Image (tube, grey):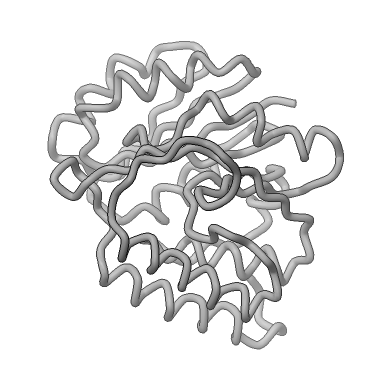
């Protein structure tokens, strides 16, 4: 199966060379769909060197709209049988993508989440309260979806293309994670989790998620799980 790797980019000029090299080296048939979300740090100019490479497409938002909006643009353009979200900041290791693909290739899953909180993979030790917040959001999400996920907020979400392209993505920022989880649960799709490594960044190194995004995630958990099912997802 061919894979579409969607890379939303916002002011990641320092890691673009490394993430493009790492994703390109993944030993699967793939296309790379990079969506620059109105970067102002030179990322857009840096991406010009990749535009003419085989298997790479660079899409551009003229103004910053948010990670969810960049994912929405990338998903609409994806042509692979499978679609995965890959952050540009090197927190997630593309070498683990083939492992994430296995449950779908084996016919067992429609969606695979890469969990930072299960398994024995290496993790950078960082913020205690940030990890607590992630676990609380996952617990709250699970209470409404009746799933037993360990990491709802993970970036690494892998889908059959017909699954993700069949879902209307409404959130334009970090609310994408609880929104898509709620809609997958409602759709009855088969979900697997696989433990992954995680090399988190500090805020000084460019981490963008803050406490306001946590409150938005709570709102999204309530909004998309309590919405009457008669409404179209």
209 lies left or right of 55: left
Q: Is residue 78 above or below residue 109?
A: above
Q: Position of residue 212 (x, y in %)?
A: 26, 72
Q: Residue at x 58, y 60 (%)?
A: 150
Q: Position of residue 189 (x, y in %)?
A: 77, 59
Describe residue 51's horizontal placement relative to residue 229 as left or right: left
| Between 217 and 132, the one nearer to me in the picture | 132
Q: How many marks?
A: 0
Q: The C terminus appears in which quarter of the rendering? A: bottom right
Residue depicted at x 60% and y 85% = 227
Is the residue 112 above or below the residue 41 in the image? below
User: 145 and 13: which one is in front?
Assistant: 145
Q: Residue at x 63, y 33 (%)?
A: 79
- Of all residues shown, which one is farthest toward the right? 107
Residue at 79% over, 47% down: 109
* Percent of width and height locating residue 96: 57, 29
Identify the image quadrant of the N terminus: top right
The x and y percentages for residue 10 are 26, 42
User: Is 226 placed above or below 199 here?
Assistant: below
């Amino acid at each position: 199966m061919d894979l579409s790797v969607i890379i939303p980019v916002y002011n990641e000029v320092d890691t673009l060379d490394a993430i493009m090299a790492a994703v390109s080296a993944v030993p699967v048939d793939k296309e790379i769909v990079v969506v620059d979300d109105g970067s102002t740090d030179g990322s857009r100019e840096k991406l010009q060197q990749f535009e003419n490479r085989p298997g790479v497409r660079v899409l551009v938002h003229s103004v910053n709209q948010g990670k969810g909006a960049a994912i929405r643009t990338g998903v609409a353009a994806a042509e692979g049988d499978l679609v995965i979200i890959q952050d540009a900041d090197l927190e997630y290791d593309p070498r683990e993508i083939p492992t994430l693909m296995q449950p779908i290739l084996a016919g067992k899953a429609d969606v695979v989440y890469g969990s930072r909180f299960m398994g024995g993979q290496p993790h950078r030790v960082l913020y205690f309260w940030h990890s607590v917040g992630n676990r609380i959001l996952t617990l709250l999400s699970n209470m409404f979806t009746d799933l037993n996920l360990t990491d709802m907020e993970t970036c690494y979400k892998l889908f059959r293309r017909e699954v993700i392209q069949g879902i209307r993505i409404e959130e334009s920022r970090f609310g994408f994670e609880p929104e898509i989880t709620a809609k997958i649960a409602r759709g009855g799709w088969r979900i697997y989790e696989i433990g992954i490594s995680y090399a988190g960044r500090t805020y000084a190194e460019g981490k963008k998620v803050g406490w306001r995004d946590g409150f938005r995630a709570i709102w999204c958990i309530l909004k998309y799980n309590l919405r009457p099912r008669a409404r179209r997802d």
